[in-house]
Amino acid sequence: MKKNIIMFIIIIATINTNAQTKSLHDFTVKSIDGGDFDLSQLKGKKVLLVNTASKCGLTPQYEELEKLYKIYGGDKFKIIGFPANNFGKQEPGTNDEIKEFCQINYGVSFQMMSKISVKGDDMHLLYQWLTQKSENQKMDSEVSWNFQKYLIDENGQLVDVLSPKTTPMDEKIIHWINSK
């Protein structure tokens, strides 16, 4: 009996440890060009994840995202854009059309991924992790609109979620990038 209790405690501890160690780095996504992008290559970097759309009132945020990336992007900070058509069908294009739109209109040089779903029954596994405390061990959130921002630390752990209306050059984001 005592042996069974100890074994049970070990199993529960292992399950809890595994849940707590899940991170951004455990996911592989598709780049906008269709290739696999292993997010483990972002270890040691802060990452701003943002769901994007080309036909939204907030679409001009691409300009500030690019500015933020030009100033702070590099070995310690990355921006990853995830086009999504979940809100008002404001991202109807194909990956090729989205890529062309971003480059022509905003000169986007940060990493863009293939279009995904960020809410609903077909929500991408990465966004399930981002939005469910049971997955990310930090907080529950709901993607409320295009250009919602998720801050991820160097260890791949969720730090915070910011409103779609929070501009990319907001002091909170810049302070977070510059903090140790």
Image (tube, helix red, strand yellow):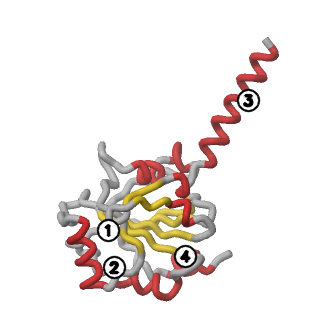
Name of the residue lying farthest toward the top: 1
Circle 3 sits on which residue?
Answer: 10
Q: Residues within 10 Å of mark 3 (few under 14, many from 20)?
A: few
Labels 4 and 2: the sequence-earlier one: 2
Which amino acid type corresponds to the residue marked 1 in the rendered image? Thr
Whether pointer 1 and pointer 3 mark residues with C-beta atoms closer than 8 Å, the reply is no
Circle 2 sits on which residue?
Answer: 62
Q: How crowded is mark 2: few (under 14 residues within 10 Å), some or many (20 or more)?
A: many
Whether pointer 4 and pointer 1 mark residues with C-beta atoms closer than 8 Å, the reply is no
Which amino acid type corresponds to the residue marked 2 in the rendered image? Tyr
Circle 4 sits on which residue?
Answer: 77
Residue at left 58%, top 75%? 176
Label 4: which secondary element: strand
Residue at left 37%, top 70%? 112
Labels 1 and 3: the sequence-earlier one: 3
Labels 3 and 4: the sequence-earlier one: 3
Q: In the figure, residue 23 lies in which quadrant?
A: bottom right
Q: Residue 3 carries which label?
A: none
Q: In this view, does 56 lie to the left or right of 33?
A: left
